[in-house]
Amino acid sequence: GKYQLLGESVDDAAGEAFDKTAKLLGLDYAGGLMLSQLAQKGRANHFIFPRPMTDRPGLDFSFSGLKTFAANTIKNNDDDNQTRADIAYAFEDAVVDTLAIKCKRALIQTGFSRLVIAGGVSANQPLRLKLTEMMQKQGGEIFYARPEFCTDNGAMIAYTGLIRLKTNKNNDLCVTVRPRWPLSALT
C-alpha cells in the first residue's frame, strides 16, 4: 500500500509513557494495563494533567513532558492508594485526550472519515470508548485491531516483514537496522 506519515512522536511514544509512568507509580514495568486498571479507581478532575502539543498546529505528539508532570505530581503528593489511583486516572485521561485530539485533527486535515487504530495502546478501553464516540459524532467509521494483536509492536513489525517477504518485496536478509522506520518509507 501507499502510506503518508502525518505525525509521529518527537520523544516518548504513548505506550512508553504509560510503561514509565506505571513504574513511577510503583507498578511493574510494561505496566500500561496495570496503570489503566489502577486508573479505574481514580477520581475524575482530582488532578488535571496537560494535553501536550494540542495547543499548536500539527499532528506530532510528545509524552515525555507528561511523564515528567506525573513524576512531579507523585513526588509532591501523598503516597497512598487513592492518590496513586487519582494520578493514574489523570495521566490516562491526558494521554487519551491527546491521542483523540490528534486523530480528529488528522481526519479533518485529510478529509478521511475512517480511522484505523493499532498498536499496544490501542487496547486501552478508555481510548477505544473516546475514539468510538468521536467517530460516531462525526459520522465516520473506526476499526480496531483485535486485542490479541495489540500487545507487542515488535510482533507487528515482524508480521509486516513476513507479508513483505511473501509478496517478494525484499527477500534480502542483509538490511540496515533502523530503530525508527516510518511505514511511509516502506512503499
Image (tube, rainbow, N blue to C red):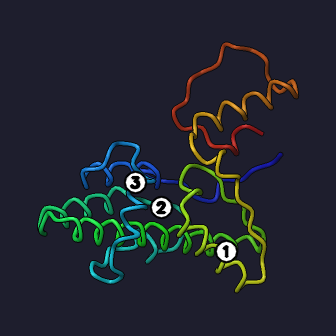
Question: Closer to the camera, 60 or 44?
Answer: 44
Question: Closer to the camera, 38 or 173?
Answer: 38
* Circle count: 3
Vertical placement of residue 27 versus 169, above or below? below
Picture coordinates of residue 178, whole percent (x, y):
55, 29
Q: Please tell me whether mark 3 or mark 2 is closer to you in this view.
A: 3
- The type of residue carrying mark 1 is Thr
- The type of residue carrying mark 3 is Met
Q: State the residue at coordinates (41%, 69%).
A: 40
Side of 187 relative to 32 (left or right): right
- Looking at the rendered image, the quarter that the C terminus falls into is top right
Picture coordinates of residue 114, whole percent (x, y):
78, 69
Label 1, label 3: how many angstroms apart (C-alpha)? Answer: 23 Å
User: Residue 91 occupies which quadrant of the picture?
Assistant: bottom left
Q: Please tell me whether mark 1 or mark 3 is closer to you in this view.
A: 3
Q: Which residue is mark 2?
A: 61
- The type of residue carrying mark 2 is Phe
Give residue 132's mark. 1
Q: State the residue at coordinates (48%, 70%).
A: 98
Q: Residues within 10 Å of mark 3 (few under 14, many from 20)?
A: some
* Pointer 2 with pointer 1, Cβ within 8 A: no
Counting residues from the N terminus, which is met first, the one under dot 2 or under dot 1? 2
User: Residue 183 occupies which quadrant of the picture?
Assistant: top right
Element on which disc 3 rests = helix
Side of 52 relative to 71 (left or right): right
Picture coordinates of residue 71, whole percent (x, y):
22, 59
Label 2, label 1: how many angstroms apart (C-alpha)? Answer: 21 Å
* Pointer 3 with pointer 2, Cβ within 8 A: no
Q: Which residue is mark 3?
A: 34
